[in-house]
Amino acid sequence: MSATEPAGFAGKRRTLALAAGVAALDLWSKAAVFARLAPGERLDLVGDWLAFHEVMNRGIMWGKFPEYSPLVRVLRIVAVIVVVAMIRSTSASARLVHLALGLVLGGAVGNIYDGFVHAGVRDFIEVDLGVRHFDPFPIFNVADSAICVGVGLLALGMLRGSDPEEQTAAG
């Protein structure tokens, strides 16, 4: 089997290590902030535009539709299974794809943990740049950030329209 052929998890330790690191950072940061702040409390970090603000998100996104919380737990697990399957089926040489999938997987694991252990996702990062319609931006966490960056990298790769393996071979 050549280095460019999909081979299960062979050559994908970095992807799995990244996912584990993201999940660990997410869970550690949530535990640290939630141990320091009372429910709903805000701690300004940089002026009034960056703060820690403890919020328990029992809904889908930014607290919307909390009545679907049990369904969301199942859908998150299905999403992780899909991401793991994508990692297994993607060539180890597709570095950008593996970076993106590692971020998504790590973030998803952190939020899955919260959903089962805390019956909701612990959010705490508040950014308020005074931008219309995002004033303030919805409160989020490290997992949410990793998922968004990972999905953005996947989208960027798709928009570029080239196969990562072709780039590796050409480079």
Image (tube, rainbow, N blue to C red):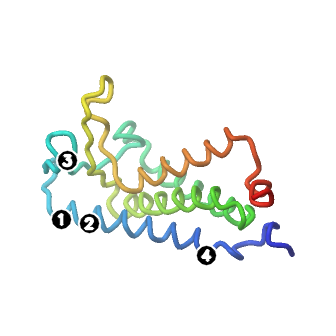
Name the residue carrying label 4.
Answer: 13
How much space separates mark 2 and mark 3, taking CA atoms? 16 Å
Residue 127 picture quarter:
top left
- Percent across and percent down for residue 86 are 69, 59
Q: Amino acid at mark 3?
A: Ala
- Percent across and percent down for residue 64 are 37, 36
Name the residue carrying label 1.
Answer: 35
Front position in the image: 76 or 17: 17
Name the residue carrying label 2.
Answer: 31
**Are the residues flagged by discs 3 and 1 in contact, CB closer than 8 Å?**
no
Q: Quadrant of the N terminus?
A: bottom right
- Percent across and percent down for residue 142 are 37, 56
Residue at point 69%, 62% (across, down): 85
Which numbered disc covers residue 129? none
How much space separates mark 1 and mark 4, taking CA atoms? 32 Å
Compared to residue 41, the image places residue 116 above or below, namely: below
Front position in the image: 30 or 170: 170
